[in-house]
Amino acid sequence: MTDGPQSVVSVVLPAYDEEATIAETVELTLATLAEFLSAGDYEVMIAEDGCSDRTPEIASRLAAEDDRVRHFHSDERLGRGGALDHAFAAAEGDVLVYFDTDLATDLTHLEELVERVRSGDADVATGSRWHRNASVDRPARRGVPSRVYNGLVRLFLRSTLRDHQCGFKAVSRETFETLRTDVEDDHWFWDTELLVRAQRRGYRVVEFPVEWTPKGDSKVDLVRDVFGMGSQILRTWYQLSVAPRITRRRSAVAGVVFAVAALALMTVYIDPSAAFSALASAELAPVALAVVVYALSWPVRGTRYRDILASMGHRDTVPFLTAAVFVSQTGNLVFPARLGDGVRAYVMKIRRTVSYPTAFASLAAERLFDLLTLVGLAASVLVGLVVTGEGAAVAAALSGRVSGVEPTAVRTAVQVAASVGIVALLALAAIVVGSRTQSGYARRLVAQLSVDAYADRVAAAIERFAGDLQTVAGSPQTFARVGATSLVVWSLDVVTAALVLYAFPGVSLSLPLLFAVSFFAVSVGNLAKVLPLSPGGVGLYEAAFTAFVVLLTPAGAVPAAVAFAASVLDHAVKNAVTVVGGVASMLALNVSISAAVDESEPPASADPTED
């Protein structure tokens, strides 16, 4: 920790488009420092951060006129935290100070701020607007969001401070150098993270009351405050409280629990006795062959994902990408809202340094091709059924009039399937149109929600996501290649279902009818389970599958009970293969967050939207 008095004090003034006030602020700062420090014991640095006005010219003039002033220039926006970090690193002082250039905090407190650290009483000092002795004139529109934010920081990050964002702080050189590489944010969360990490490291962090008067008009900024600050609180909480508790052994145990939970969830919406009866009555040979056929579809999924990523400029091996797909799909069996997709994005980020926007764009492209293939398969079979005079059966299925099947479940499944199909077609149309324009819709939309510089980064991330997606769906060659592998993936899925259906005694359908029914049932069933109404789509898939098998086969050929049992067994076979592959992949990849970070540290990035 800090010992003994320190001599040189560096005051950093972060400045972005401050041409109207920077000269006066520097003058007042120098005058205040001169009241309690000797000449040569302090410097004032103007951390000018990619300004678009005359601030750089004014800062250069001030530095030329007074050797106590230094101008730290950046051509590009570093972000508030990035500018402070770079300026502190270049400063000469042993005590590093910064405060906002609008001088909302009264400079009569500057001596106390400096001396708290300079004397060795504290390693980090910060002014507090929420201290009981503080003098603050703060309207509700600024006070309420601040209290909520500080409350969340105390709750999630176990901070003891009342005010983390007061722009009036000092830190010892030693403390800053120790914590610098740990602090990841480079914008508004930077100083909060510095305070939290300093407390976690055992440094002496003190806050004291200040007199504070708001300057300018401030309001809640949706992008900065909700997306930016909220995500950084969660990131820091995960890094400090969750990741250290994840070990290799715990990851292995979690994988086993994961598998058991996934299998158990299949009994939530179905009668377990019906599932066991189905397994007992089915012939083992066709079921075993179905397992083999479905397992063969997974390397094809890995190949498809390789082609998608390659079109975005990222090349990788099929085995690794197959494992990544296995892990994410296993997660989707357990977690609602397809949260397993986020696991794959994380794996790609940590193990292959693929940015989150690109990782999620690749996932979106994969989902889009899945939906388009399913819609195409269903439409092809539907046309064939109508042409052959079976349109009435399809209409009955769409209305939910199926003997032995709960009508509400059927209608819900069919409605969801139809909605998802329409959305998929509209999404493809939007991507194709977007790939031929430079509209900048995302940037204009974000600008309507935020006036903060952080919005530019969010808009850039959205545009990168959309651009990556367009490179896949907008390229005829890539579209054809990925579309072909998607067709193979789902054809193998259909063959699996046909083999399972064929395994039940008494099901005697011609091969053309067997595969036609399987194509339609699998297509509509998978479209129905896209919406996260249940983990793994359990329930919706069975309802849609059962309805169409019963109505699209000759009367009595496949009773409702047998069709339902087949849907359960088909889903169980596919989920079992997924879980086994997922657990094996988790163990192979060692999907432990802390271990993954240690083994494959991603390159530093100035873009917080990638963290």
Image (spheres, grey):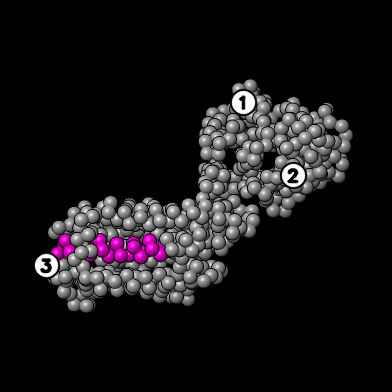
Identify the secondary structure beneath mark 3.
loop
Q: Which residue is mark 2?
A: 88
Is residue 455 a member of the stretch shown in magenta? no
Q: Which residue is mark 1?
A: 131
Bounds of the magenta segment: 559-582
Using the rendered image of the protein, determine whether residue 572 is visible from the camera's viewpoint: yes
* Up/down of 234 relative to 168, above or below: below
Q: Rounded to the nearest whole Å, what is the CA distance between mark 1 and mark 3?
A: 78 Å
Is residue 568 a member of the stretch shown in magenta? yes
Q: Position of residue 174 (x, y in %)?
A: 74, 42
Residue at image position (79%, 39%) is 94
Q: Position of residue 548 (x, y in %)?
A: 21, 65
* Up/down of 144 relative to 354, above or below: above
* Up/down of 170 relative to 313, above or below: above
Q: Position of residue 241 (x, y in %)?
A: 54, 43
Q: Earlier in the sequence, mark 3 or mark 2?
A: 2
In this picture, residue 410 sits left or right of residue 478: left
> Which amino acid type corresponds to the residue marked 2 in the rendered image?
Phe
Identify the secondary structure beneath mark 2.
helix
Q: Which residue is mark 3?
A: 556
